[in-house]
């Protein structure tokens, strides 16, 4: 098999991957994205649709799955440039939003987002790991020590690069599927005992339905800025697109199904903990918990891998290895502070103010204006170091970020801001409020 690295670590940063290394098939991408999907963080929105939105489980399932499906279409479409040109997503982003917005705003936001989720996932996994260790040995390992070791392992695998992501997810996949099967077994076993799902206080409200559909959409559409990081090793653009879409949709189908059923029947937002407690035997419960740890490791390798490229796009002089090391080191440090997970609502809201308008601009620019292709002129300008300022993108980003923070949360600002941002950007581009290009310090 062709190697994507020299020594032990992947070397390709912002430069194009050689065509000889573009050998990954749609099945490999389906495995990677499926392994990323079923984790404790992704269970939250489906569960909240039932526990806080009071939707019946089927309505809650359909709401979040449809919202995610729409996001995955966008994410898969934006994986195509990576497969065509062998470049990472954040670097390609310069052709959509301009070099200034990409390097000064978009990539730093992506770095912060990846760092936050990396640390939160590690914190949650560390608590589970502490509980598992206490079952077998009467030893208390300090949280910071255990979190540092766990985070360091995932950061190291991300440093190794794409080959590590591919091999780890392929190794974990059978265990993850067995764990999900056991989770469904426990759910349906308990449901059959009373012959019904608990639906007290559940009722169908279309406003609530669209609210949670919007939440799911916004949660995943931010992936448009990073999907090319993976597919730059794809055999063809079709292989990358199909693999990303199939893996994401199948994985989130399981996530939404388990999350809404556990919320409806057990009134819980954490299926791994709840179902391990309700398991018919100690070993079944232990395996469910173990699969939760594997899911956390899978998604966090992805967070660290794509986060490193975002940092590299902001700070190209670092190179791939140093940017991955810096990201990993920061992630390890942040994982030692459990309080970060308690501030999720405020942090996600702040990050969303930047993520949502940027995602809309990227999708509209690539699918509407570029018609799914990037001109050779645009690519040459990026590679040559031309400094593009996309005025339409900057104006849209600033105004819509402010709007996101002002709009009341109950009005579901995510989907609304995404739609309005798309319209604003379309209008500005139509009026030729486009870009300024600086080449060697001169305006052209």
Image (cartoon, rainbow, N blue to C red):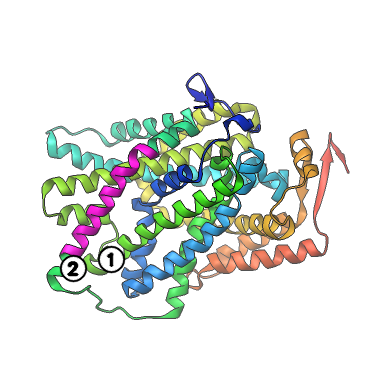
Side of 361 where 282 appears, left or right:
left
Tell me, yes or no, if residue 170 can be seen here: yes
Q: Which residue is mark 2?
A: 191
| Magenta residues (range) | 170-189
Residue 65 figure quarter: bottom left
Q: Which mark is residue 86?
A: none
Q: Which residue is mark 1?
A: 261
Q: Residue at x 15, y 54 (%)?
A: 279
Q: Residues within 10 Å of mark 1 (few under 14, many from 20)?
A: many
Q: Main secondary structure of the magenta part?
A: helix
Q: Residue at x 12, y 47 (%)?
A: 282
Q: Residue at x 40, y 51 (%)?
A: 37
Q: Earlier in the sequence, mark 1 or mark 2?
A: 2
Side of 417 where 156 appears, left or right:
left
**Numbered marks: total:** 2
> 74 or 307: which is nearer to us?
74
Gap in Å between the C-alphas at discs 1 and 2? 10 Å
Tell me, yes or no, if residue 97 can be seen here: no
Coordinates of residue 314 in the picture (x, y in percent): 63, 37
Q: Residue at x 56, y 42 (%)?
A: 231
Coordinates of residue 101 in the picture (x, y in percent): 69, 47
> 170 or 410: which is nearer to us?
170
Q: Secondary structure at mark 2?
A: helix
Q: Quadrant of the C terminus?
A: top right
Coordinates of residue 274 in the picture (x, y in percent): 21, 56
Quick check: 401 above or below 155?
below
Seen as rendered, the residue at the extreme top is 7
Coordinates of residue 173 in the picture (x, y in percent): 34, 43
- Is residue 143 located in the magenta-colored stretch of the structure? no
Q: Residues within 10 Å of mark 2 (few under 14, many from 20)?
A: some
Mark 1–mark 2 CB contact (< 8 Å): yes
Quick check: 79 above or below 8?
below
């Amino acid at each position: 098999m062709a190697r994507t690295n020299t020594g032990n670590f992947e070397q390709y940063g912002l430069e194009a991957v050689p065509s000889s290394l573009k050998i990954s098939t749609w099945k490999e991408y389906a495995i990677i994205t499926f392994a990323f999907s079923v984790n404790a963080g992704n269970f939250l929105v489906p569960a909240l649709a039932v526990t806080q939105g009071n939707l019946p489980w089927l309505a809650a399932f359909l709401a979040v799955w449809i919202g995610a499906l729409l996001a995955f279409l966008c994410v898969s479409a934006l994986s195509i440039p990576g497969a065509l040109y062998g470049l990472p997503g954040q670097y390609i982003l310069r052709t959509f939003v301009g070099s200034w917005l990409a390097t000064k705003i978009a990539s730093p936001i992506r770095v912060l987002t990846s760092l936050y989720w990396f640390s939160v996932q590690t914190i949650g996994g560390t608590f589970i790991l502490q509980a598992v260790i206490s079952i077998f040995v009467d030893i208390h390992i300090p949280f910071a020590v255990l979190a540092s070791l766990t985070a360091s392992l995932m950061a190291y695998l991300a440093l190794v690069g794409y080959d590590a992501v591919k091999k780890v997810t392929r190794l974990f996949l059978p265990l993850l599927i067995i764990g999900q099967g056991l989770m469904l077994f426990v759910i349906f076993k308990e449901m059959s005992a009373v012959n019904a799902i608990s639906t007290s206080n559940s009722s169908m409200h279309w406003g609530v339905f669209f609210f949670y559909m919007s939440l799911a959409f916004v949660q995943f559409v931010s992936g448009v800025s990073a999907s090319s990081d993976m597919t730059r090793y794809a055999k063809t653009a079709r292989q990358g697109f199909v693999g990303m879409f199939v893996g994401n949709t199948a994985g989130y189908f399981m996530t939404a199904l388990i999350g809404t059923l556990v919320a409806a029947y057990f009134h819980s937002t954490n299926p791994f903990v709840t179902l391990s407690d309700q398991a018919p035997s100690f070993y079944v419960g232990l395996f469910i918990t173990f699969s939760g740890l594997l899911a956390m490791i899978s998604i966090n390798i992805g967070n660290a891998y794509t986060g490193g490229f975002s940092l590299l796009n902001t700070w190209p002089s670092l190179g791939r290895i140093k940017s991955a090391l810096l990201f990993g080191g920061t992630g390890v440090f942040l994982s030692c502070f459990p309080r970060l997970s308690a501030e999720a609502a405020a942090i996600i809201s702040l990050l969303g103010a930047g993520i949502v308008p940027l995602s809309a601009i990227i999708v509209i620019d690539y699918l509407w204006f570029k018609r799914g292709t990037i001109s050779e002129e645009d690519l040459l300008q990026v590679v040559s170091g031309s400094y593009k300022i996309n005025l339409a993108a900057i104006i849209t980003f600033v105004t819509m970020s402010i709007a996101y923070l002002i709009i009341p949360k109950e009005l579901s600002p995510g989907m609304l801001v995404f739609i309005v941002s798309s319209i604003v950007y379309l209008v500005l581009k139509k009026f030729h409020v486009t870009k300024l290009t600086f080449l060697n310090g001169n305006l052209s």
